[in-house]
Image: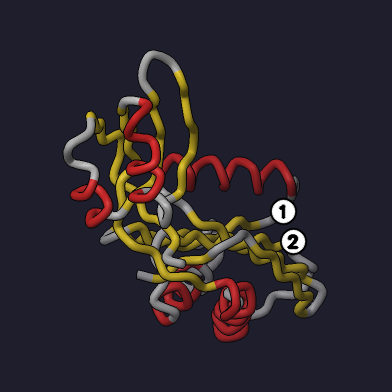
Amino acid sequence: MLSIKTSQKYEETVKNSKFIALIFRVQNIDDINNYLEKVKGQYPNATHYCYGYIIDNIERFSDDKEPAKTAGLPILNQIKSHKLNYTLIIVVRYFGGIKLGTGLLTRTYSKLAKEVIKEDNIISLAEGLDISISFNYNDIKDVDHILSSSKIISKDFNDRITYRAYVEDNTLNKLSKYDIQINNKIYIEKE
C-alpha cells in the first residue's frame, strides 16, 4: 500500500485565480476534519476549499461550490492514479475575477493535485499494530532484539518494563510469551 511521507504544498496562479494544493497523510475522518479546519484557518477568505481523499475503501470528494465534478473529482482521480491510500489533498482557490470554464477548471484542479504528489514523497505502508508489551527486567535483551526493526514509542521502567511500539504481525508472533495489549490497528512505514 502506498501513501505519502510528509505534508507538501504547491501553488499556481491561473488567470488571476490563486490555487494552493496541500497534501496530507491521514488515518481517519477526524484527521480529515481537523486538516480542513486548519486549512480554512490558514487561508481565510478563500473562495473554495475543494478536496478528495482515500482511506481504505472510503473515497470522497468535495467541489465546494465549484461546478459539479470540476474540482473534487479530478483531485480524487489523481490520488487514485498514484495508487495512494490514507491520503487527503485540499486545493484552496482565491477567485481572481475571471471565470475559467469547466474544462480549464477541471484541468487546473487535476494539475494542482498531480503537482503536489511528489514521487520522492511516496512511501510503502504495511499493516501493523500499536501495542503495549510488559516484561521482566531479565527479558530486556530478548525484547529489544525482537523489536530492533520496530518503532518503540515509549519505555516505562517500574516493577516491570513496559514498551509501547508499532509492530508488524510477524514481530507480534515472536513476542507471544510476553504480556501484550493491542491498542490499535495502524499502518507503518516500510523501511
> Closer to the camera, 100 or 150?
150
Please determine whether, in this image, residue 88 is positioned above or below residue 110: above
Q: Which of marks 1 and 2 is nearer the N terminus?
A: 1
> Closer to the camera, 40 or 118?
118
Residue tagged 2: 94
**Residue 156 percent coordinates (x, y):** 47, 24
Relative horizontal placement of residue 177, taking residue 159 as reference (left or right): left
Please report the residue visible at 22 percent of the width from the left and 49 percent of the height from the top. 174
Residue tagged 1: 46
Tell me the element at label 2: strand
Instruction: State the count of labels.
Output: 2
Cβ–Cβ under 8 Å for marks 1 and 2: yes
Please determine whether, in this image, residue 187 is positioned above or below residue 34: below
The quarter holding residue 121 reads: bottom right
- Any part of residue 28 in sight: no
Relative horizontal placement of residue 56, taking residue 31 as reference (left or right): left
Q: In the image, which disc is placed on residue 107?
A: none
Relative horizontal placement of residue 57, taking residue 6 as reference (left or right): left
The quarter holding residue 101 reads: bottom right
Q: Which amino acid does label 2 sit on?
A: Tyr
